[in-house]
Image (cartoon, helix red, strand yellow):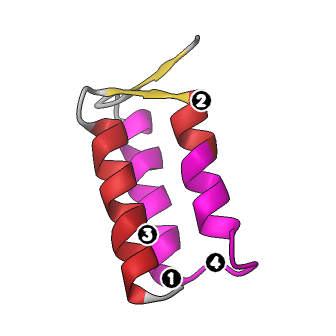
Amino acid sequence: MEQKALSDLAKRAKKALEDGVISRQERDAIVAAIYADGKVSVEECAIFRSIQEKIWQGEVLIAES
């Protein structure tokens, strides 16, 4: 993934987590961006892993609607 796209992904993830709740739509958009080029970089994996960890630790909730 090129640097600008990676930066955009990081911004999208940060915005999705700002309110402590991530919607399934936001999560799906982040995953789609990660897989858009057909390969997952270490940096993309780290961004998604950080989201997962925040969910597991209860720092971020998943919106049901």
In the rendered image, residue 5, in percent from the top left (x then y), is placed at 45, 76
**Magenta segment:** 29-56
Q: Is label 2 in contact with label 1 (beta carbons under 8 Å)?
A: no
Taking the view exactly as shown, the residue that stands out farthest to the right is 38
Q: CA distance from mark 2 to mark 3?
A: 19 Å
Q: Is residue 31 left or right of residue 22?
A: right
Q: Which residue is mark 2?
A: 24
Residue shown at the point (62%, 54%) measured from the top left:
31
Q: Which residue is mark 3?
A: 46
In the rendered image, residue 53, in percent from the top left (x then y), is placed at 40, 47
- Which kind of residue does numbered mark 2 sit on? Arg
In the rendered image, residue 24, in percent from the top left (x then y), is placed at 59, 29
- Which kind of residue does numbered mark 4 sit on? Val
Circle 3 sits in a helix, a strand or a loop, which is it?
A: helix
Residue 52 in the magenta stretch? The answer is yes
Q: CA distance from mark 3 to mark 4?
A: 10 Å
Which of pointers 4 and 2 lies earlier in the amino acid sequence? 2
Q: Which residue is mark 1?
A: 42
State whether residue 3 is above or below residue 21.
below
Q: Is label 3 in contact with label 4 (beta carbons under 8 Å)?
A: no
CA neighbours of label 4 inside 10 A, class few (<14), some (14 to 19), many (20+): some
Circle 4 sits in a helix, a strand or a loop, which is it?
A: loop
Q: Which residue is mark 4?
A: 40
